[in-house]
Amino acid sequence: MTAKARKEYDVIIIGGGPAGLSAGIYTSRSRLNSLLIERGVVGGRITDAELVENYPGFAKGVSGAELGQLMQQQAARYGLNTVIAEVTGLELKGKQRVVSTTQGDFNAKAIIIATGSERGKLGIPGEGELTGKGVSYCATCDAPFFKEKPVAVVGGGNAAISEALHLAKFAAKVIVIHRRNQLRATPIMEEKARAEARIEFIWDTVVEKIEGEAVVKRLSLRQVKTDKKSSLDVAGIFIAVGLKPSTDYLKGVLPLDRAGYIITNDRMETKVPGIFAAGDIRQHSPRQAITAAGDGATAAIFAERFLSQ
Ligand SMILES: Cc1cc2nc3c(=O)[nH]c(=O)nc-3n(C[C@H](O)[C@H](O)[C@H](O)COP(=O)(O)OP(=O)(O)OC[C@H]3O[C@@H](n4cnc5c(N)ncnc54)[C@H](O)[C@@H]3O)c2cc1C
């Protein structure tokens, strides 16, 4: 039976990143009727990682795309159903939890929420208009469009440096623009970036405007300490400035913290019985693939116990 025809499940997992896929491996191996709903790329945000060196079992590292595919294949092997759709709402109806999606409604007795987080936006003029025309949030996806051209990366964390390192394989020059005078990235990432001849840094500076008509041409910059304005000619700008939890569809259903992350206990239980949360979506998550996978396994084990009660 296809996932679309069958609309009643024991467990619905929302989000197909490392947390959701690990949960799916566990629930499917436990012979629970399980459905995973993913709106984009199955594999989640780790598929943007050029090389993952800290996921156990891969002594030489593994590309994020391959890691995501392997997790998906492993879950599919045990019969996890997958639907590509965006979840737009979650409603409690007695013992049933109804998940509304762009492909219709699906019911389950237990839900595991694993929708992670998405890239923050700068909210400056030109960003929306030029997205896809030089403004990007994913170097793995778009770097080949900028061969031998100058590009900027905005941000100072691991995600920004990972983007810069990937872009340095294609672009003529990668200028990292950071609003502070030191990076937040881990020392090993910083060392790699500083050793890369094509990467340069502009410190204590913010981007105020992205200019260009059909495509990105230049950035208006402001030095935050001196207020001095300048402009920088680039063909692209990659924005990696923090994360926003993907929990908009949960407002009013579950208690969220001030930033929008889900509060759970160490069994991954939320305040609502039968609803679990796993991975980067959880308050205080270390936001790593391995911790997300661990959360997914924990949520699945306690969801199974909940269903057998
Ligand atoms: C460039 C980059 C490099 C990284 N490198 C590393 C690394 O080397 N090592 C490491 O451990 N971690 C790394 N990470 C972090 C790692 O990717 C995350 O910690 C991990 O993916 C979190 O897993 P998750 O399942 O909780 O969420 P995610 O991977 O974010 O997956 C959530 C999924 O839910 C989907 N979703 C969201 N909202 C909805 C909705 N309403 N309906 C349906 N689906 C929805 C999303 O499309 C997404 O696929 C990196 C991240 C990035 C961006």
Image: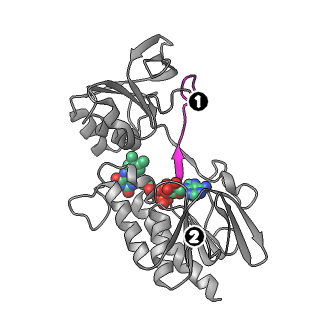
Kindly indicate the quadrant of the structure image that contains residue 304.
bottom right
Q: Earlier in the sequence, mark 2 or mark 1?
A: 1
Residue 134 image-quadrant placement: top left
User: Disc 2 versus disc 1: distance between alpha carbons?
Assistant: 33 Å
Magenta segment: 116-127
Which image quadrant: the C terminus?
Answer: bottom right
Q: Is residue 280 visible?
A: no
Q: Nearer the viewer, residue 286 or 245?
A: 245
146 or 274: nearer the viewer = 146
x, y percentage for residue 251? Answer: 72, 54
Left or right position of 291 against 246 = left
Residue shown at 47% from the left, 10% from the top: 228
Residue 140, image x, y percentages: 36, 43
Q: Say above or below: 236 vs 164.
A: above
Instruction: Name the quarter where the N terminus is drawn.
Output: bottom right
Label 2: which residue?
268
Q: Judging from the image, what secondary structure is the residue with disc 2 in?
A: loop
Q: Which residue is located at x 22 percent, y 33 percent?
A: 196
Task: Count neighbours of disc 1 (C-alpha within 10 A) and say few if under 14, some if 14 to 19, many if 20 or more.
Answer: few
Q: Is residue 183 left or right of residue 23?
A: left
- In the rendered view, tell whether residue 11 sits above or below residue 264: below
Main SS class of the magenta portion in the image: loop
Residue bearing mark 1: 123
- Protein image colouring: one colour
